Image: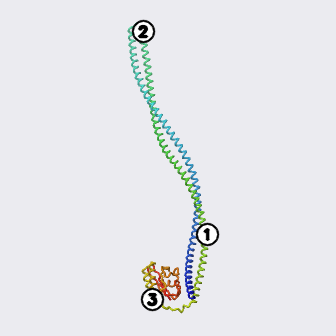
Amino acid sequence: MVEAFLNESQVFADRLIASVDDLGRAADHLNDIAERSSDAGDKLRKRSLHVMSRLKQTLVWMKEADAQAERVHALSDRMKQESERTRANMTDMNEAVNESVRALSELDGLNRTAVDHVKHSTERMKHIEDINELLREIVGQTSLLALNASIEAARAGESGRGFGVVADRIKKLAEQSREAVERSSRMVEEIGQGAAQAAAAVETERASVQRAIGHVRSIALKLDEASAAVEAVHDSALGVADANREQRIRVSRTAEMVNEAAELGQETVQSVEQTMADMRRQREGIESLQTVGAELQQASSELVSSILSLRAEDGAELVGVDLEQGKHILRSLAAELTAAGLDKDRHKGMLLRALKAYDGVEAVWSNDTDGRFIFSEPAAGLLHARHREWWKRAMAGELYVSEPYVSAITKRPCITLAVRYQGGAGGVVGIDLRV
């Protein structure tokens, strides 16, 4: 019973040492993580503060942009109003120009009618001149007739006196008619000259009206182009006003979002500071854990020393143990595992065949280069073998043979043989021989 107790105690001490070793490794790993996390938290805090500063500056700029957008909005509204007034003025000018074109067109029609009337009157004057020419001939013939009558009355003497009086009267009428015809001809000539001058003036006026119509129509075309440009400016002013209004809304929303981001950044800084405080407490806990691990390591070592001092193994003899056969078995397994690589099923088949083939073999196992068990029969009582002497010596290239000790697997005295194999990434294969 004492022997069993001592065996159990030694196995427990071995497992405790392994656990303490894992605990130390975990504590070191946690300490490294805490160090990196602390550094990352400090960098995050600095970056968060830098981002906060940038966000605050951005918020100031956004407010300035909002004020500038307000001024631009006022200017765009004023431009829109001015463009509306300009558009109305251009419409009035277009209507006035169109009215001028209509009036000049009517005047041109009236001039054309006046020219036609003058031409008609000139033609009538020509008829009057023809009549006057006929009257001149009649007056000439009448004067000649009166002269002949006077001559005949003078020949007739006293009997022709009355006829002579008539002849004189006809002569006077003829002279009066000649004078009337001459005056009429002069008047017709003057009227013709006036009509010609009037026709020339009307033609000149008509040509001026035609030129005015051309100028006015050219002005109308220019005004149409100007109206189109004013309309485009007006549409642009409306678009600018709408875009500026939308821009103001977006700037305002962006400023709100930046403000929210600044508040979130402040909360982030606070959270980071709280996290860093928690990490400092965590590091303190890890340091305490390392202290406890060191104490447990010392206590475990003292426990193992106490157990070994109680045991009477110094006089133990390797009765019935064939170390050469064990080495042969181990070398054969190493060669087979080299060919198997890290395939767990192949490891299992090879190790179980060796366990059944040799009566003195109590346990077989294989590890990878990190000490983890690939296969073990019976199941390994350890998580890994990195702290075990047989694993360290075998990984160093030695065929290791231990002193008698209590197996963590069978919990009975044994000796361990271990050697490295090279298959895949390589590893360690080991066997326990019954003592």
Q: Amino acid at mark 3?
A: Gln
The residue identified by callout 2 is: 162
Instruction: Answer left or right for 420 relative to 69.
Output: left
Q: Amino acid at mark 1?
A: Gln
Q: Position of residue 125 (x, y in %)?
A: 42, 25
Badge 1, how many Cα within 10 Å: few under 14, some, many 20+? few
Q: How is the image coloured?
A: rainbow
Q: Secondary structure at mark 2?
A: helix
Q: Position of residue 111 (x, y in %)?
A: 46, 32
Disc 2 vs disc 3: Cβ atoms closer than 8 Å?
no
Label 2 to label 3, Cα distance in Å?
Answer: 204 Å
Instruction: Give the camera-side residue of 207 and 186.
Output: 207
Of mark 1 and mark 2, the one earlier in the sequence is 2
Badge 2, how many Cα within 10 Å: few under 14, some, many 20+? few
The residue identified by callout 3 is: 325
Of mark 2 and mark 3, the one earlier in the sequence is 2
Does the rendering let one see residue 368? no
Tell me the tag on residue 274.
1
Instruction: Give the camera-side residue of 90 and 373.
Output: 373
Image depth: mark 1 or mark 2 in front: 1
Q: Amino acid at mark 2?
A: Gly
Furthest residue toward front: 1
Image depth: mark 2 or mark 3 in front: 3
Q: Secondary structure at mark 1?
A: helix
Image depth: mark 3 or mark 1 in front: 3
